[in-house]
Amino acid sequence: MAILDSYQRKAKITTSMLNYLEGVTCNEVTGALYAFPRVHLPQKAIEEAKLNNCTPDEFYCWQMLEATGITPVPGTMFGQKQGTHHFRLTILHSEEKVAAMYDIISRFHKEFMLKYKDEEETEQ
């Protein structure tokens, strides 16, 4: 029972943390293994992905891997809806490691969004 309670706590923490991030929406995580958030990427990041010959979500995932060592899986691997961008995140780690991982992801995401912020957003 303690393991199931831990899974439920991690699922709630995961949903809350992901929905806190700018441009990220995540349905409530109801399973014990994965979150599948949608990430609304700035146009500048989408264009950079094209220059790097990959999809926008692949680009985002590669950037996260290179910056943090965390390995999300691009949503394109799962047949996501055309025009949307997602990634899959495994949440099997201990609660302590999950909390630390979210601090790292939050920092990465904030820096990524700032780096690729669209010009019109910067001017406002």
Image (cartoon, rainbow, N blue to C red):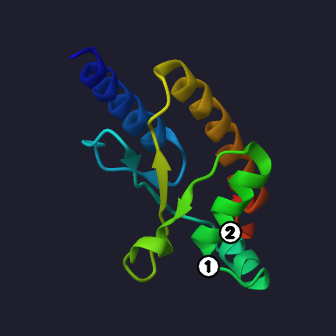
SS at circle 1: loop
Q: CA distance from mark 1 to mark 2?
A: 6 Å
Q: Are marks 1 and 2 in contact (CB under 8 Å)?
A: yes
Closer to us: 66 or 84: 66
Disc 1 marks which amino acid? Thr
Locate residue 102 relative to residue 24 in the image: left or right: right
Q: In the image, residue 64 lies at what x, y percent?
A: 69, 52
> Where does label 2 land, which residue?
59
Residue drawn at the location 64% of the way across and 60% of the way down: 61
Locate residue 16 relative to residue 113 in the image: left or right: left
Q: Indicate the quadrant containing the C terminus: top left, top right, bottom left or bottom right.
A: bottom right
Binning the other alpha carbons within 10 Å of mark 2 as few (below 14), some (14 to 19) or many (20 upward) gives some
Name the residue furthest top: 2
Q: In the image, residue 92 lies at what x, y percent?
A: 44, 35
> Where does label 1 land, which residue?
55
Please indicate, yes or no, whether residue 114 appears anywhere in the rendered image. no
Binning the other alpha carbons within 10 Å of mark 1 as few (below 14), some (14 to 19) or many (20 upward) gives some
Residue drawn at the location 66% of the way across and 76% of the way down: 46
> Vertical placement of 43 versus 36: above or below?
below
SS at circle 2: helix
Closer to us: 45 or 5: 5
